[in-house]
């Protein structure tokens, strides 16, 4: 076996690193990615939703109507001190509701429940508000360090009307579910 000293051949070293970097960051179609899954015996998988309906999901929950609530964190892993108004994607960190309205097994509708949830929302729990058997709105608890936020839809239109911290004081930068 011959060992190649990459420090004496910088162009070869660069080519090898760039080749691996390209392989590591290459994107595949959602259908191609599905082919790599290996479900347990008796379990099947299918594609229900993909980009651009959702991007960089960080948490999910399912409501009583079978809709999937997703938190998106496009600004994930960026330290607060790095944001100077140019690097941060404003409005990108959001909560989306995905729904299969025609019942064909694929999401076909997206509702933005809330946006501009910065720093990145990393936890999610849905509480539906009912009165006399009728859904009146939704209360959503969001892990959003340094806070545990509550976002409320008070009129049933699937859009957050109120936003306030339930708990505050979690510390750290890029605290990953702190």
Image (cartoon, rainbow, N blue to C red):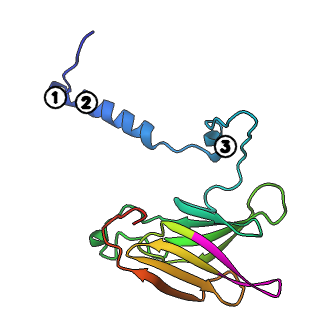
Pair 1/3: label in front: 3
Q: Which residues are magenta?
A: 125-138
* Residue 13 marker: 2
Mark 1 vs 3, N-terminal side: 1
- The Cα–Cα distance between marks 1 and 2, rounded to whole angstroms, is 7 Å
Secondary structure, mark 1, is helix
Secondary structure, mark 2, is helix
Check disc 1 and report the residue beneath it: 7
* Residue 115 marker: none
Locate residue 163, reporting x and y percent.
52, 86
Q: Residue 71: which quarter of the image?
A: bottom right
Q: Is residue 90 above or below residue 19?
A: below
Image side of residue 81 versus residue 26, left or right: left
Secondary structure, mark 3, is helix
Disc 1 to disc 2: CB gap under 8 Å: yes
Q: Residue 17: which quarter of the image?
A: top left
At x 84% / y 63%, what residue is drawn? 102
* Residue 31 marker: 3
Give the main secondary structure, helix, strand or loop, of the magenta stretch.
strand
Mark 1 vs 2, N-terminal side: 1
Image side of residue 109 versus residue 95, left or right: right
Disc 1 to disc 3: CB gap under 8 Å: no
Q: Residue 59: which quarter of the image?
A: bottom right
Mark 2 vs 3, N-terminal side: 2
Residue 90 falls inside the magenta stretch: no
At label 3, counting other C-alpha atoms closer than 10 Å, the crowd grade (few under 14, some 14-19, many 20 or more) is few
Viewer-nearest residue: 75 or 130:
130
At label 1, counting other C-alpha atoms closer than 10 Å, the crowd grade (few under 14, some 14-19, many 20 or more) is few
Viewer-nearest residue: 3 or 164:
164
Pair 2/3: label in front: 3
- State the quadrant of the N terminus: top left
């Amino acid at each position: 076996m011959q060992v190649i000293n990459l420090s004496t051949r910088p162009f070869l070293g660069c080519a090898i690193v760039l080749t691996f970097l390209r392989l590591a960051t290459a994107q595949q179609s959602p259908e191609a990615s599905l082919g790599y899954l290996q479900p347990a015996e008796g379990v099947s998988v299918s594609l229900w939703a993909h980009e651009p309906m959702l991007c960089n999901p960080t948490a999910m929950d399912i409501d009583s109507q079978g809709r999937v609530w997703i938190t998106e964190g496009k600004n994930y892993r960026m330290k607060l001190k790095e944001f100077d108004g140019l690097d941060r994607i404003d409005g990108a960190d959001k909560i989306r509701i995905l729904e299969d309205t025609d019942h064909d097994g694929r999401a076909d509708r997206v509702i933005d429940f809330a946006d501009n949830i910065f720093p990145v929302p990393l936890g999610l729990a849905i509480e539906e508000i009912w009165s006399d058997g009728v859904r009146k709105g939704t209360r959503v608890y969001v892990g959003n360090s340094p806070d545990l936020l509550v976002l409320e839809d008070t009129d049933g239109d699937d859009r957050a009307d109120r936003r306030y911290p339930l708990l505050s004081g979690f510390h750290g930068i890029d605290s990953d579910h702190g």
